Image: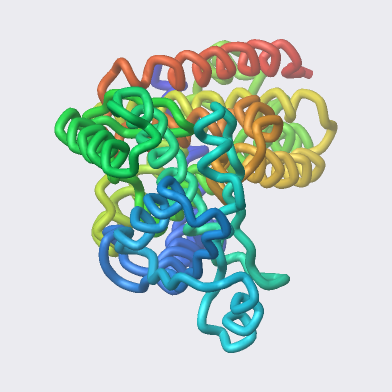
Amino acid sequence: MRQVLSITLLQFRLALKSKGTVAMVFGMPLLLTLIFGLLIGGGSDGSGGQTFPLAVVDSDASFASQKLVEALREEKTIGLRVARNEEVTRLFADKVIAAAVIIPSGFEDDLSAGASPEVKLVAPPGGNLQLAVWPVISREAARVAEDYRLARRIAADPASAAALQAAYDRVTRERQALGISTSHERVQRAKAKPDQRLSNLGERALGFTVMFVMMLVFSMSGVILQERQRGTWGRLLVTPTARASVLTGYLLSFFVTGLFQFAVLVGASSLLFRISWGALLPLAVMAAAFILCSAGMGLFVAGIVRTYEQQQVVGVLFVNATCMLGGVYWPLELVNDTMRRIGYLTPQAWAMDGFREVMLRGGAWSGLVRPLIVLLALAAIFMTAGLARVRYE
């Protein structure tokens, strides 16, 4: 046990010995959170700070489309103005708005027929600020669609505007009283309030924490290749220390270093940006599962490539690509169903879901079962495959 702890402590110190590494793994995530969260996204609590200038074009002019306009107008993160279709180009040119929501003609008819009309978000070429507000629009569109369909079912006379309005008011009152939230046109019971969500700052802090923790653990998992290139790996294996103890020490150092980085980033973002990360125990369990998964995948890659440099290059490309697919850079609600399914083939997507569950709803274990099972299963698979490919020469 002493040998295991010695190896763990040594690798932990080596990983954080360089000032450049410390700046990268701790400073860079916080800096990116500041830039993309505060300077672009507005307030830290999701209810105050900068509002997003948005125009809405109601091409349907129906009961359902008007309810969507009203819902968007009530959003505190949106500065909404109603515009005609021909006005949008001028508003973009005058930089009055950053994006426009287009409610298509036939919106209400499609809802009545059971279809899912597509609400479009348009922005000037090169603009990306609209990514921060699309989850809000998507959520409100889904909520209005569900409320409207329920109202038509219970209305005494759906063709009567007064009867439909009364039924719609009843549906919204009962939804708010029961604490029901709507997502992707499904009604789900949740402890969170209907409008509760992570602020843009919280999303950025979570995303960059997940990304940089995975990068560090991936980088450390290639240390065996580095030791082999330097010749210290072979000398270590001929010592009286058992091979199992050597490997355990290295794996434990990966885990401890990743957990330390996660704890520092969580603490720093809480103090600097007043982000609430939720209950400590479920947060730590989620972090542990994600770090184990990252270590296993990094070790597997280290077993495939031949040099430490190759492992670092492959690791950076892999982490960045899977972060894009897994909803770290932008929410998976922004992509189509096919890309969303592909996104959930990555550990980051499950980690983001699990951490959001902790941050928004207190981390009830029932909501963490699937993310934890998936992450631990991936950790077991890749760790086993990676250990099988470790060379002891």
- In percent of width and height, residue 57 lies at 54, 64
At 63% from the left and 33% from the top, the residue drawn is 340
Q: Quadrant of the C terminus?
A: top right
Question: From the viewer's perspective, is 229 left or right of 126?
Answer: right
Q: Nearer the viewer, residue 274 or 51?
A: 51
Quadrant hosting residue 279: top left
Question: From the viewer's perspective, is 268 left or right of 20?
Answer: left
- In percent of width and height, residue 196 lies at 28, 44
Quadrant hosting residue 39: bottom left
**Outermost residue toward the bottom?**
94
Q: Quadrant of the N terminus?
A: top left
Q: Nearer the viewer, residue 13 or 3?
A: 13
At 45% from the left and 61% from the top, the residue drawn is 33
Query: In this view of the protein, can residue 172 be seen by the observer?
Result: yes
Q: Is residue 162 above or below residue 154?
A: below
Q: Nearer the viewer, residue 48 or 250?
A: 48
**Outermost residue toward the left?**
177
- In percent of width and height, residue 211 lies at 55, 46
Query: In this view of the protein, can residue 9 be seen by the observer?
Result: no
Q: Is residue 68 above or below residue 250?
A: below
Q: Is residue 116 above or below residue 84?
A: above
Question: From the viewer's perspective, is 60 left or right of 340?
Answer: left
Q: Is residue 61 above or below residue 145?
A: below
**Outermost residue toward the right?**
306
At 65% from the left and 45% from the top, the residue drawn is 324
